[in-house]
Amino acid sequence: MKNKPAIILLYTSLLLFVIYLFMLKLNYSTDIRLHDTYIVVAHSHVLEIILFLSFLLSAAYFITRKLNLSKALTSLHINVTVISILVLVSALFCIKSTMYSTNDSNLGSSLFLKVISGSIIAFVFAQLVLVFNIIRSLFYKSTRQNKSNNI
C-alpha cells in the first residue's frame, strides 16, 4: 500500500459508498439560513460529491503513477484527505436534521459549523499539496531531461 496511494483513496471511496447507501435510507438534511437565504442540503448529496471527488483523486494518482512524486507530500496528501473526509462524513452522519443560522448562539451548531469548516479547509489544503507535488515532479522531470540533453 505504501507504493500505491490510490488504493487507500479507493478503499475510502468504497467505505463512503456503503455509508452513502445507508444515508439514502435515513434521509438526513441540514438547513442553513444565511441572512435572507434559506438553504436545505441533503446529506446524501454531500456524500455524492465527496464520493465523486475521492474517485477523481484515485484516478489522479493512477494517471500520475509514472511521475516521481514525493513520498512525504503524497503521504501528507493522503492522510489529510482521508481524515478530513471521515471527519466531515461523521459530522454529517451524527446530525439528523438541524437548522443553522449565521447569528445562532447555540454551542452545538457553532461547534458543528466549525468542524465542517475545518474539515473543508483541511481538504482544500490537501488538494493544494497534491497540485504542488505534481508540479514539483514535472519540474524535476523537465530539468533532468534538459541536463541529459546537454550532456
Image (cartoon, helix red, strand yellow):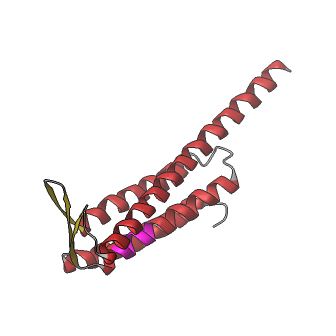
User: What residue span does the magenta drawing correspond to?
Assistant: 85-91
Rendered view: 137 above or below 19: above
Magenta segment's dominant SS is helix
Query: Which residue is at a point 34% across and 66% down the rendered structure image?
Result: 113
In the rendered view, does 37 fall on the left or right side of 67? left
Q: Quadrant of the N terminus?
A: bottom right
Q: At x 34% / y 70%, what residue is drawn?
A: 110
Relative vertical location of residue 52 with respect to residue 141 in this rendering, above or below: below
Residue 35: x and y in percent read 18, 54
At horizontal 39% and vertical 61% (from top left) the residue drawn is: 117
Side of 104 relative to 124 (left or right) = left
Q: Quadrant location of residue 143?
A: top right
In the current view of this chain or complex, which residue is farthest to the top? 150
Q: Pick the quarter of the image with the C terminus.
A: top right
Give how far across and how far down residue 6 sits, in percent.
54, 59
Q: Quadrant of residue 141?
A: top right
Q: Say how many tags the image has.
A: 0
Q: Which residue does the image show at 47% across and 65% down from the upper left? A: 84
Residue 89 colored in magenta in the image: yes
The front one of 113 and 16 is 113
Is 73 inside the magenta-drawn segment?
no
Question: What x and y, as percent, mark residue 104?
Answer: 25, 68
